[in-house]
Amino acid sequence: MNSFGMKLRFSTFGESHGKAIGCLLDGVPAGLEIDEEYIQSELDRRKPGKSEFETARKEADKVEILSGVFEGVSTGTPIAMLIYNTNQKSKDYTNIKDIFRPGHADFTYFNKYGIRDYRGGGRSSARETAARVSAGAIAKLMLTKMGISVLSGISEVAGIKSEVFDYDKAKSSIIYALDSAKEEEQKEAILKAKNNHDSVGGVSRVLIQGVPIGLGQPLYYKLDGVLADAMMGLNAVKAVEIGDGVLSSRVLGSQNNDEIRSNGFETNHSGGILGGISNGDDIVLNVYFKPTPSIFKEQHTVTTTNEEVDFSLKGRHDPCVAVRGTVVCESMAALVIADMLLLNMGSNMEGVRKYYS
Amino acid sequence: MNSFGMKLRFSTFGESHGKAIGCLLDGVPAGLEIDEEYIQSELDRRKPGKSEFETARKEADKVEILSGVFEGVSTGTPIAMLIYNTNQKSKDYTNIKDIFRPGHADFTYFNKYGIRDYRGGGRSSARETAARVSAGAIAKLMLTKMGISVLSGISEVAGIKSEVFDYDKAKSSIIYALDSAKEEEQKEAILKAKNNHDSVGGVSRVLIQGVPIGLGQPLYYKLDGVLADAMMGLNAVKAVEIGDGVLSSRVLGSQNNDEIRSNGFETNHSGGILGGISNGDDIVLNVYFKPTPSIFKEQHTVTTTNEEVDFSLKGRHDPCVAVRGTVVCESMAALVIADMLLLNMGSNMEGVRKYYS
Amino acid sequence: MNSFGMKLRFSTFGESHGKAIGCLLDGVPAGLEIDEEYIQSELDRRKPGKSEFETARKEADKVEILSGVFEGVSTGTPIAMLIYNTNQKSKDYTNIKDIFRPGHADFTYFNKYGIRDYRGGGRSSARETAARVSAGAIAKLMLTKMGISVLSGISEVAGIKSEVFDYDKAKSSIIYALDSAKEEEQKEAILKAKNNHDSVGGVSRVLIQGVPIGLGQPLYYKLDGVLADAMMGLNAVKAVEIGDGVLSSRVLGSQNNDEIRSNGFETNHSGGILGGISNGDDIVLNVYFKPTPSIFKEQHTVTTTNEEVDFSLKGRHDPCVAVRGTVVCESMAALVIADMLLLNMGSNMEGVRKYYS
Amino acid sequence: MNSFGMKLRFSTFGESHGKAIGCLLDGVPAGLEIDEEYIQSELDRRKPGKSEFETARKEADKVEILSGVFEGVSTGTPIAMLIYNTNQKSKDYTNIKDIFRPGHADFTYFNKYGIRDYRGGGRSSARETAARVSAGAIAKLMLTKMGISVLSGISEVAGIKSEVFDYDKAKSSIIYALDSAKEEEQKEAILKAKNNHDSVGGVSRVLIQGVPIGLGQPLYYKLDGVLADAMMGLNAVKAVEIGDGVLSSRVLGSQNNDEIRSNGFETNHSGGILGGISNGDDIVLNVYFKPTPSIFKEQHTVTTTNEEVDFSLKGRHDPCVAVRGTVVCESMAALVIADMLLLNMGSNMEGVRKYYS
């Protein structure tokens, strides 16, 4: 239950304040050059402590590959990657040892398992997503070889919406903003909330280009369904849209259908997916993150023995979890597409014969 | 790839104009009374042709149980259910035999598989959802025994939003409207589109009550992720929200966190799920359906040999697929919750010992 | 839990004396010609009542395809197949309603599920294997297209061993005997046991030819492991050998290793599998069936309320379950090979690129 | 494909001469005391270099737990365990870099993946089984709490068969011999082969006691089938028997059936499994290992470019892989039983109600 994917399957382990976090990535085709610097560069994009818009926890997030790579190339065996935790401050958490933080998984983990590693959120911490990014980086290496790119950026912070989606711009923005005209306003909203001991939400927009027609396994491992699972399963995500998403439900069929001409679709309201299968057009997702639940304002809650208390959280937290979250959205998208690329092989006899010819 | 669920696993088969559709439901605990009338009543809620707001195709949708039930009780073996197709009019589809309908899966299925059962959309038709409803009915029978209820209704049609969510009212509404004050306006929007040879979208809202704390398997079979997959995988769905969803991304952390008191959560912005695990509160989902892509207006498209044509669709179609879709959302929700209920068993040693004592 | 396979996944349903048995076969590549006569001919090889060496229950075992095939060709969607039961004599079983037959699953099913369809063994009956054979027939159609053949025969009955393995001969033998010189003796052993109200065991030998090098997914979906699961999971099977099997454990390494020359392996002690992966040589299995537990001799047993009784079984049973079992071994082998053939696609980047080029 | 199990799922990684090997064990119920000394003691039983009957490679096999355990107790999150490789002598393998060793996976890995980590067999090395033993040790800790024990020993070496099965005796035997009267002869056979630069096979016998009735998920995740997969998937295993195994196929039904009395089964020919489900009696397996293929005698083989060569292997190898293999058989058996114990929960409504009451 800590695994994702069918043919490209990754499994993660580790707690926020444990020794290490890491992952197993199983099913990487042999013969892929594994560029460790690239993997590290992806982790660097996600790592905390890079600016005032992020948590102050500083982690090198140095990844070590333990298996599955020989002389720089994947061997087809599972690739294990390890990231040691170095900057835990577990004593920050002793005051919440017996307290359920509002908006957190504390309450549900404790009730499900009867035990909880309270230090930094334990397993439920977004720190686990570093493992996803390391796996996603390998998926991206594979996709690049197939001419597929996965991009993303922040399209909205605290309700302040981007009007243009410039993915190149997002790469150089400290908050991965897609619209430079809105970036300052979005930054201010984050800092204002932070200064008020509060937090804000935001939206990540993901763009996947170059996907061949035919990815997605109907009817129950559909491309849109699996992408929705991948995104909704991320910490703090509360809504996912494919293509026009919510808007689609408010227009007419004649407005929403993407008509087809001999050179392709005339529009892309569908977000590149029809019937759960990629149609060759750009795949577009919007992923909505709630504000970080960890805020420093005093809040009402109860203890593990159900006594009411008011408390103020300590620790180090992102004022807007969507910012670093967008990197994770990209990783998950890459993992899904790579998995579907492999799964799709064998859909028809012509392909099977070609493969074995 | 035509299966869903881990411990309660259902698999469906069948095409819109084939002999029959049906499903296998595997993992139903032995000893559950299988009320066939109830299953049929659920299918009756979804079946087409009940009103002018639905497709004119009339199907009895009479379900037959082939296995897994002995003397009215489940035996623990797979329950196979069969629904024969009776009202196909396949010749309506001969004019689209070589055409890709805009907004449909025609294009993607043909390209993925190299062959397509064009009659009524074949496997990609929403007709398949009758199989889901039959499986969902059994899941509901099981949930009822555990004190869990799954309800739903239409909260929005063509952008006309409900202001109250009255699930009892929805049961008696022909369009499953949650807000009787909005129902007429919503009906008019449907009929107007229908008369213009067009279609409208809508939103289903699902409410799940009585769920025990602890359901959901983090970090990659989370309750919210799996619900998102289940809903996004339905025909025409383009967005899914849990709890406050999109709205959550636009408020402050202090507004969005659900504070806790000794008698429970003070609010339910989270929609009953924290860290991918049920928190015991009501689970709330919003599922956004695009307008039915099958419209009778002339549209631009291409043939299977990529020649441009303008064509007008024939056949019988729902002017608002969300209406009958809400019944399917309920079924999927019930299947997910029942699966999670079974999966959760064994989360801790105390439970294992209790079970085997 | 009633499913087998990863990419070619089949699920079965049905009880011995229920309305029908059947299966879903999911993952068949589109574009395969589905020869229904061939499927029926495979079922005819397995069907009961063909001779005095088999149970007297006569079943037409007429298979009906419900989905997944359009104009004689697979569409890539799940293929559902149905076989109605026609010759049940359930009243034969009323005397064992409350009794656990020695050697049967009665005892374990009742204790696991708390309920048992006692008629003809219910779900645990070997009647379910007809569904396996129908699925296996489609797998064979696919394998034939890829130049792979799956053959089998009876190599041993009641300890009487074949000395030659003539798979052609086996096809025309009423007991699928591989060695015509031993066939009469083997038949006599069966009839002698039958006349004594007893039963005998036997061994099926399976030969798979033309398998490409590379099938099998180490280290936990190995070709040998999955074949062992497939065979050991058959009714009455108690041992499985790959290649030289038990004998391998009694010789020296220098005797058991298959040395390699430029034109291939010099011997085939390995049975065509090294490290869980096919090596291109013939795959050889031996599958050991215990004697049918259903015998008419008086036996000691207990009732469902644990009262001791002596009873004599009624009903109709095979005196040597291995005979018809060999057909099922072939089907399972075909399903495993076809699954592995599809799973193997994507093992290396060269193959991925070739597929998508 | 490097994972095993459904609810208790373990995944391994690592190559013989890579940095480390290890595993993830997912699904361990929370609240289990994790005795690290016990885990290490199990690894010590398997570790190489303890005597002249084993390979001379000396590995400390010191296991480190990275996650999933908090204050000595499992938390329900995945348990990652790491074992660093310390005693590789990779240069021993440079002479086989371009050679396929007879009886090894060299040939099949190279052909499947197009690349091969030749050092010490890479991923196909039995070194990976250390990871299995660490996972198995945790499974055993869990089983012990449930009153279930898993024992094993060597019942046969080079055809020299044990006549008594004394599992206590086996614990103190350097070759895990079950029959002290045969131990010296068995040891001599090993040393004789070793001195002749050859190797011998052997048989591990596994005994599982205290298993509750009802474990095993028919019809395709049966207890016997999954045990067969688990054992056949081990390096060098070529045959698996449950209960009387091969012998069952040579006796009469009346001899093989285990009659039942009010205090239980009168015999245990079935090996504790009926219809793929545990019957409460002792579960007995025999696992047949071929002789180690790595022998120092000169052998015929080919290079990766298919040139014929005669070569003599270097390196360090077990003269009888069954000896240390028996420890791994125990681990795999423990993992299967623990998985089945968890999977079985939810088989009937009575159990579901009890769990949630």
Image (tube, coloured by chain):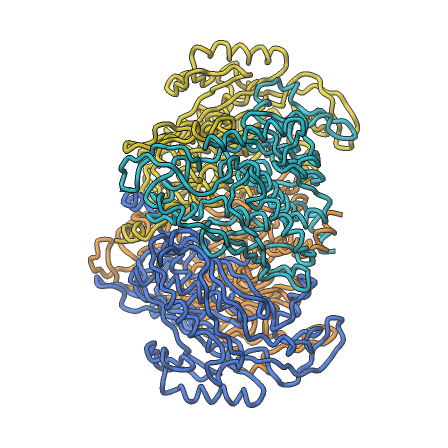
Chain colours: A orange, B blue, C cyan, D yellow
The relative height of residue C254 versus residue B257 in the rendered view (above or below) is above
Q: In which image quadrant can residue B308 be found?
A: bottom right
Residue D57, compared with residue D27, is above or below; it is above
Residue A188 at x, y percent in the picture:
45, 70
Tell me which corner region of the image, top left, top right, bottom left or bottom right, holds residue D62: top left
Please name the residue shown 53% across and 65% down the image. B21
C126 displayed left or right of A269? left
Q: Position of residue C33 (x, y in %)?
A: 70, 56
Identified at 77% across, 27% down, the residue is C261
Q: Residue furthest left?
A: A307
The answer to whether residue B218 of the structure is visible from this angle is: no
Question: Quarter holding the C terminus of chain B?
Answer: top left
Q: Is residue A334 left or right of residue A59?
A: right
Residue C13 appears anywhere in the view = yes
Residue drawn at (63%, 77%) of the image: A258
Q: Quadrant of residue C260?
A: top right
Q: Nearer the viewer, residue C125 or D41?
A: C125
